[in-house]
Image (spheres, rainbow, N blue to C red):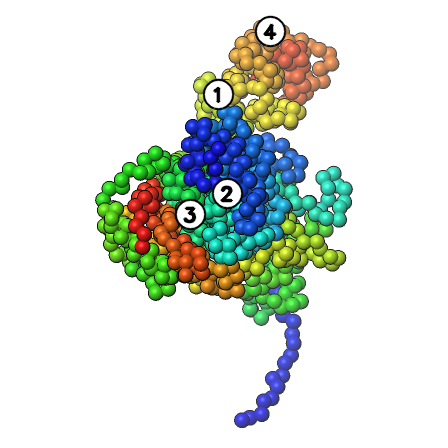
Amino acid sequence: MSDASSMSLIEVRDAIRNGDLTAESAASSCLHAISDRDGGIGAFLQVFDDAALESARAVDRGERTGSLAGVPIALKDNICLNHGRTTCASRMLETYESPFTATAAQRLIDAGAVIIGKTNLDEFAMGSSTENSAFHITRNPVAPDRVPGGSSGGSAAAVAAGFVPGALGSDTGGSIRQPAALTGVVGMKPTYGRVSRWGLVAFASSLDQIGPFGRTVADVALLMDVIAGFDELDSTSSPRAGMAVSPTLSEPVGKLRIGVPRQVRSEHNHPAVVRALDAAITTCTSMGAEVVDVDLPRLDDGIAAYYVVATAEASSNLARFDGIRYGHRAALSAGEGLEDLYARSRAEGFGPEVQRRIMLGTYALSSGYYDAYYRTAMQVRRLIRDEFDAIFASGVHAVMMPSTANPAFRIGEKVDDPLQMYLEDLYTVTANLAGVPAISVPAGVTTEEEGDGTALPVAMQFVGPVGGDEVVLRVGAEFEGGRVEG
Amino acid sequence: MPEETPIPYTHRMPTIVSTSLIVGLEIHVELATRTRMFSRVASMAHPGAPEPEPNTLIDPVVLGLPGALPVLNRDAIELSIRMGLALGCEIATESRWDRKSYFYPDLPKGYQISQYDQPLCGEGHVDVQMPDGSTHPIRIIRAHLEEDAGKLLHELPGGTSIDFSIVDLNRAGTPLLEIVTAPDFTSADQVEAFSRMLRNTARFLGVTEGVMQKGHMRFEPNINCELTLDDGRTVKTPVVEIKNLNSFRAVRDAIEYELREQPKRWLDDGLEMGAGMKSTRGWNDQRAVTFLQREKEDAHDYRYFPDPDLLPVTIDPEWVSEIRRDLPEVPHLRASRYESTFGLGPREAEALVDEREVCLFFEAATRAAETHGLAHDVAGKAAANLVLQVGLRLANEREVLVSDLGITADQVGAIAALRLNDEIGSSGADTLFEALCESDEDPAAAADRLGLRQVTDTGALGAWCDAVIADPANEKTVADVKMGKMAAVGRLIGGVMQLSGGQADAKAVRQMLLEKLKSGSCS
């Protein structure tokens, strides 16, 4: 029997399809790997042992078919599933069970995927290290004393550790790409509107996108083909047709022009990231691509604009957690009233980072401050989008830049310094602000010396124009296949 | 520096010489869409919707569950545009949704989806028709669309008291059109006339079912007074907003109450209209008084911002033109037309436009009568008589609308023609109307079958007349008529009608009786 934990998603899919592996044994080897090793990593918040095995046996009986028949998948625990709990790694939703399933998850299930469990995250997806989970931290499988990034750190770690061949996360400012980069897997944030947000517990509605993790770009492409497409339940869903890039992923893109923003050649980049960027340019050139310098002058403003827009929307999106209909409700003492119910339920249910962002966002939307903060941030956002538009209008197919400036940092290193933590998202937030697709692909490692005895992954991301999801996948696949080591 | 000397101060209570009323109105109209504003679950404000148990008409969107998203109900936009056009409003080409944030248990998401600075309907104007025939112009400031909140129940359904509150979200997310007028009303009469007109119009256009008891329409008057003082000064009292009035009576009483109280309050506290002076009051229906809810308009910060879950609404002017083209004539204009064209009284005309279906039924009956050769004005008058007399009587008895009695408008038109041509009498018309509620028979054939044709044959009429005149019981009446007491002839006509079994043509009988008694041929 093949060991599913070392196989790519496509290999697992093909092995099940060819009869070399049963769906049940694929699921069961995932479940064993989790029970054996996840104690030291903490990728999962819930594992659906029986339900996963039953769902896999249904594939083996031929009752469930589809392009992902029998493939084990993990879901970030802010994606609703009408099975088990949907906690968002928050005390607020510790026992919450969703009566419905997110469209993206349902599409996976309809394609035959076996949902193995729900993965850890920073509470309500707010964070860049998965240290903000109310339940436990997640360790980076590559270096267990380091963070896996966040907020989809559980999904990234689950794939990196070989617990599942693929997973879904959500990306509001880099929450898929940054953990993918830090754990050495592939992760993609689709064009805004390409994947339905129905059933994704909202953090910042205008920035949130569900996206896939996999070991290879081809894995991610296959998952995108399944989850992308119009959904009438999401008003911001793009009417653009679904995707079918997987079968033709390896076809050459043609004469490529890749832009590298001058602003990402920063002195703040880790030496390994500097080397990886140089090597990536060499790789692109060797692929026959033309690499050109481009300008993204507002890159640095992106982080400020992002934290205003994201916190403003979050302050409103999280208002529904009031202890009235569901979620944590404080036990009131005699004499306490409705105001106390709200204040105490929210104070007890939300962790410190969530409270910090709700307060920041509330402030940014307050009368008298709206223009200075929210309106200005939206204007910056517009400018960033215009800058991307200008780059793509000049004939550039994809923009290449590091996914992060640094490899995985140590657990606890940045928890007391929110600003430093926010800067983790420097290279990733612009894609969310502009609504464009971006994929993070492994692009090298640190030296063992640099990584305290471990070669830590670093990654490049390829950013495409709105709707250019297929383009970034093809470029990513070609880069992955032709990568020249730095 | 000269020493400050206190200015002699004599307090004199000013006297109010006259008080004039200033009222602006906000009206919340629950739209009669089949489903909610942003979800597909059925709406209670849809006509014929059952009265459900608390929290049975809910779904993830209405509940504001994590991960649920709003999807706009286009019907709500169309109904709002219809109403906006009827109020003469400019219709926006680009409109937007904003979140209005506040915490309350009946507000599931912690924000209400509303419209802040880009409402669907902009400025408009209507002329309110007063009962005395005059009109009063009212400016509409805007009409925006929002979602309704749920309800808090403080006792169990059935009335059992509880020491907690129940949140019922059946109403949450119902589309609500908020119409805001300028402070152009100067009397409670005007407010009432406008409110009634608005309700009739909204009902007629299918915008709302308009059942006041169900809260389909809620009125919030903003009231203050201009006081003229004996020293020639004028002052304005602080604006008072009365929340959630859902009967015309309450609107009128609350305004009149404030008109009486505000001058007294001013004499008491001297407070005048100004920023931050607005207060909110509720209405106690039993005691017929307003009561303070919020002292000054708290500078409540709703933190409006564009809802990122919804796209802006782009409204095609072509679509608006289409809606405008299909917009039916509004009821109050129809009623005036009926008065002038058909010679109906205001009450009759009002009764015809009260229910849209009845009104359309009446107009169809009028057209049918015209096809039988009646002139338009005559046809309308005759159809109105049938609909308002026998029609309404039967409808009331059977608790249905005239249009649902079973008789068709074509049949009513034919009856009107038979009656106008004196082929049947008025009691015959009533009988025929009632009979045709159960039958799709041709009215002329039915009149024959039922023997309702009037007898105009002079031979038969002559015999009946002679018999009545000869009856000793009528001796005195006959004598009276002969002496010129024309009113007495009615008794004799009645006698002939009785003899004929109702089939005699009363007009012909009268004429024949008078002739016979004048000539003395039977004396």
Label 2–label 1 contact, CB within 8 A: no
Tell me if B44 is positioned left or right of A486 in this view. Answer: right
- Residue drawn at 52 percent across, 12 percent down: B442
- Dot 1 falls on which chain? B
Q: CA distance from mark 3 to mark 4?
A: 109 Å
Q: Which mark identifies residue A185?
A: 3
Quarter holding residue B464: top right
- Dot 3 falls on which chain? A
Q: Which mark identifies residue B111?
A: none
- Observer-side mark, 1 or 4, equals 1
Which residue type does callout 2 highlight? Answer: Phe
Callouts 1 and 3 on one subunit? no
Q: Which mark identifies residue A163?
A: 2
- Observer-side mark, 2 or 1, equals 2
Which residue type does callout 3 highlight? Answer: Val
Element under disc 1: helix
Label 1–label 4 contact, CB within 8 A: no
User: In the rendered view of the protein, which quadrant contains the C terminus of chain A?
Assistant: bottom left
Lower sequence index among marks 1 and 4: 1
Residue corresponding to mark 4: B460
- Dot 2 falls on which chain? A
Where in the figure is residue A131, as x and y percent of width and height?
Answer: 53, 56
Residue B350 higher or lower than B478, as above or below: below
Which residue type does callout 1 highlight? Answer: Ala
Lower sequence index among marks 3 and 2: 2
Element under disc 2: loop
- Residue drawn at 59 percent across, 11 percent down: B452
- Observer-side mark, 1 or 3, equals 3
- Residue drawn at 55 percent across, 43 percent down: A34
